């Protein structure tokens, strides 16, 4: 919990290919940094001190577990008094950074002045990095409705990125977030604009075939409220995602099965000990991740880092 770091935000936890023995998460605030768990060993690193002056935000482990890509985001919020949407989260700057976990070398392979890069995701073979990018409209948050992200890709030769970023998907009047890949299938969140779809009731999940290029909204799981963050199971047959379909305000988790014909089954709520829990809990779930077992780290281990 965030009681050990002056109640700073604790977020963005990721595992390499669902391996419960290794993970990282970011802790913001005083004494914060990136917390690494490696088979019971726990450490914290201030990424800004090990390379360019950047901290990590959204994270993607390369499938072999050696390289990690972060997006480094300068994130801000605007709150609204006369709108169904209570707030908007946006970036005024964001770049892609690469870390080699064996050498702890940090480089910035994608660094641009007029565009914003975020939400990295590796292909299943580790040869391609996908991410989202938008031109900076320059007058945020007032021009937030002009902030639309495209899906981009870069090739990786095993140690470094090669070639220039290329556009893989650009959908008119929609912004792409959270690409997540299993095999040749990529699921992303599409919203009207912006980079934080959890506050957009029009946000839906879409699926793309990376081989054929076909793309469609996943109508069988979407609702009239926001669907946003999602994660594949290790065998590519299940997907868990966050949705606000019950009341439009609190985020709950749903599970769906991915069939061999490319369709998804009707989603069901994440089971709880009591069926009233999903109705009465005044807290939101987010960033669900499937893993292949139990994480081997205790609250006591984490507390030692912040003392």
Image (cartoon, helix red, strand yellow):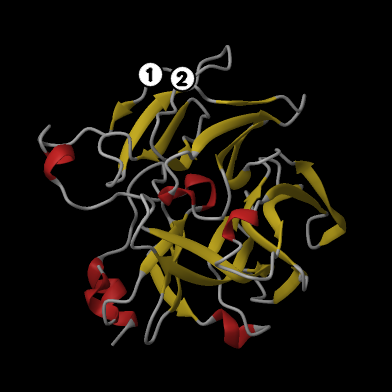
* For the residues bearing labels 2 and 1, Cβ distance under 8 angstroms: yes
Residue that label 2 marks? 220
Dividing the picture into quadrants, the one containing residue 61 is bottom right
Residue that label 1 marks? 266
Could you tell whether 71 is left or right of 86 in the image? right
Percent x, y for residue 128?
75, 47
141 in relation to 266, above or below: below
Could you tell whether 192 is left or right of 276 in the image? right
Could you tell whether 247 is left or right of 125 in the image? left
Disc 1 packing (10 Å; few <14; some 14–19; many ≥20): few
**Which secondary structure, mark 1?**
loop
111 in relation to 304, above or below: above
At 70% from the left edge and 56% from the top edge, which residue is drawn? Answer: 133
**Which secondary structure, mark 2?**
loop
Dividing the picture into quadrants, the one containing residue 260 is top right
At 35% from the left edge and 71% from the top edge, which residue is drawn? Answer: 9
Work out which quarter of the rendered image holds the N terminus and state it: bottom left
Work out which quarter of the rendered image holds the C terminus and state it: bottom left
């Amino acid at each position: 919990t965030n009681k050990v770091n002056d109640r700073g935000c604790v977020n963005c936890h990721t595992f390499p290919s669902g391996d419960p023995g290794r993970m990282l998460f970011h802790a913001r605030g005083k004494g914060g940094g990136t917390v690494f768990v490696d088979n019971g060993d726990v450490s914290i690193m201030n990424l800004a001190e090990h390379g360019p002056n950047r901290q990590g935000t959204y994270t993607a482990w390369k499938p072999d577990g050696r390289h990690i890509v972060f997006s480094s985001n300068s994130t801000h919020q605007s709150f609204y008094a006369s709108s169904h949407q209570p707030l908007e989260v946006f970036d005024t700057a964001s770049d892609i950074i690469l870390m080699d976990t064996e050498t702890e070398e940090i480089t910035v392979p994608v660094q641009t002045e007029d565009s914003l890069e975020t939400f990295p995701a590796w292909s299943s073979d580790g040869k391609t990095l996908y991410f989202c990018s938008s031109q900076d409209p320059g007058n945020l948050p007032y021009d937030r409705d002009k902030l639309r992200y495209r899906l981009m890709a870069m090739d990786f030769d095993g140690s470094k990125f090669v070639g220039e970023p290329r556009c893989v998907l650009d959908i008119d009047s929609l912004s792409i977030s959270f690409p997540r890949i299993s095999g040749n299938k990529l699921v992303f969140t599409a919203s009207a604009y912006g980079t934080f779809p959890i506050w957009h009731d029009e946000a839906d999940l879409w699926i793309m075939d990376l081989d054929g290029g076909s793309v469609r909204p996943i109508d069988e799981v979407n609702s009239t409220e926001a669907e946003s963050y999602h994660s594949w199971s290790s065998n590519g047959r299940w997907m868990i995602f966050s949705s606000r379909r019950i009341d439009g305000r609190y985020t709950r988790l749903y599970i769906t099965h991915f069939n061999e014909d490319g369709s998804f089954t009707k989603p069901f709520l994440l089971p709880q000990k009591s069926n009233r829990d999903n109705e009465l809990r005044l807290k939101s779930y987010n960033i669900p991740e499937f893993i292949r077992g139990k994480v081997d780290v205790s609250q006591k281990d984490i507390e030692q880092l912040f003392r």
